[in-house]
Image (spheres, grey):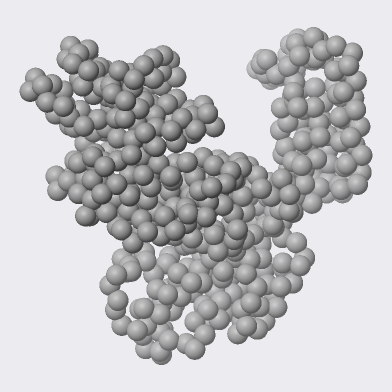
Amino acid sequence: MSPTEHGRGPGHPGPAHEVALEEAFREHWGRLLALLVAQFRRLDLAEDGLGEAFEAAARHWPAEGVPRNPAAWLLTAARRRVLDRLRAEAVAARKEPLLVVDAQARHDAAAVMADPGGLVADERLRLVFLCAHPSLAPESAAALSLRLVIGVPTSDIARLFLVPEPTMAARLTRTKRRLAATGAPFSIPPDGPARDARVGVVTSVAYLAFTAGYAPGTGPDVTRTALAGEAIRLTRVLREVLPGQPALDALLALMLLQHSRRDARVDPDGLPVLLPDQDRGRWRHDEIAEALGLLEPLARRPLGGVADEYLLQALIAAEHAIAPTAADTQWHRIAARYAELEDLTGSPVVRLNRAVAVAESEGPAAGLALLDGLEAHLPHSHRLPAVRAELLSRAGDREGARTAYDRALALCGNEAERALLATRRKALDAAAHPPVESPGDP
Amino acid sequence: MRYFVTIAYEPTVWADADETTRQRYHQEHLAFHDAVKERAHLVAGEALAGPETATTLRHRDGAPVLTEGPFAESTEVVGGFYLVDADDLDTMTELCTLLPKAYSLEIRPVVQVEGFEER
């Protein structure tokens, strides 16, 4: 367990020891965990031992004061607990598979354990590559990365991925055991195409963790959107341990831009507010500024690999972010970016978004033309008939629009979105011109 | 770690392959052998006769029953195996990428069963 599991969070600065504990958690969780893994070759024991060390800190620091070197204190406490567990296991003659860790990493970790004052070795990059190992299912990799690299509590990860906590706990346990049993190494892949491919996996795993926070759920969405912020924190750590990776810069920019709209996305009744109707004053403009700063050096060069996909998506989100009002949106530029993105990915979802952008810049007929034949590729999407309905309505075909809304309602499983669709369908009779659902929201 | 690599292939692909393709398969297996010799250790490896030669043995009501054909009916069949000692999964998968790309390869660690260490 981590200190945040007791409900302490950032934004509520408490006594000095609480602040110190929170800071130690954010600064050192991943580094200490990686060191324990390098030394003991057991993900489960490293995680439990470190969690207990933080609990001990929460008990001792208020009375005894914050130690001079909190990281060293935590490492020593965690190490002692892991050794206790190992002794107990030896008595019970239990055998757990050990991770493959090379001699150098074990030697370095042992040196730090012997003299934790220095704490120079940083094994987080090995941990990052291990948690996002390509032999894992992407969702398991995303959950494990959040848990082990930045210490997100299991209960929060369960909420993020819309599963009960025991299910998530079991999934994490299985994943940790699998890594050891299959011989996935705690190592940094050698430079070259293989390493690039692994960085690509690490990046997509972080993005999956982020989009999970925005996937439509059944309950109230608000907390889960906040948890998407943890994926941003993960991405910041990834950039720290993997500097100079344009894919991670583009991805962080994309996440920041999408996340900057979180407060404006839902109205007081919990209904989604579409992009054109959002109060732009409620967007987080500091986050937008950071994202634009990240994009500036990237925008003029092809990056290669998945980086270009993230970059194009980020540039599209940036167009929305820089428009002072919805009416100022430069839809022709967005349409052009979507055309590039469609060339790159061939994705029918991208084409759907492109159709919306084209409809905004050239009129509903041009948008509708791009929707032709898309049903075959997106048979279960409620967004496709919803977009078609909006565009038909704008083109004056109310009967066609009504049929398309019915189809969208039949396919949509999310209550908030269904309510919105029903309102739109009703509004047809008023012959208004509602704004079309905009792309750009994940 | 010791890995058992099961090679599965679609018989029609092999049956339809021309001489050049078959030669290439052969070369790719040789390249795998060379790389394993350099970076790991080959314990064993064999190619199997076709699935039509398989005999499956099961017990029904305590009595052994033989049936013609492999135990699982699928479009892919087991065509052979390798048993390799490699440092880790990454090394093993990298070596396996040298084998013909039409294969599906199942890479599984071997476990030591207690009581059988010395046999």
On screen, residue A57 above or below A8: below
Residue B50 point in image, percent of width and height: 82, 14
- Please name the residue shown 49% across and 82% down the image: A70
Q: Position of residue A359 (x, y in %)?
A: 31, 26
Q: Relative to A86, is B100 above or below?
A: above
Q: Nearer the viewer, residue A248 or A25?
A: A248
Q: If the image is split into quadrants, where does the C terminus of chain A sit?
A: top left
Looking at the image, residue A358 lies above or below residue B4: above
* Left or right relative to B24: residue A112: left
Number of numbered discs overlaid on the protein picture = 0
Q: Is residue B5 left or right of residue A294?
A: right
The percent coordinates of residue A80 (x first, y second) are 58, 77
Q: Quadrant of the N terminus of chain A?
A: bottom left
Of A150 and A395, nearer the camera is: A395
Image quadrant in which you'd find residue A242: bottom right
Residue A393 position, x and y percent, is 20, 20
Residue A409: quarter of image: top left
What residue is at 41 percent from the left and 84 percent from the top?
A: A60
Residue found farthest to the left = A430
Residue nearest the viewer, comparing A354 with A381: A354
Asked whether, in this view, residue B56 is left or right of residue A397, the answer is right
Q: Is residue A311 left or right of residue B24?
A: left
Query: Is residue A177 in view?
Result: no
Vertical position of residue A86 compared to residue A96: above or below:
below
Is residue B65 something one can see in this rendering?
A: yes
Residue at (56% x, 70% y) in the render: A32
Q: Residue at x 62, y 54 (%)?
A: A129
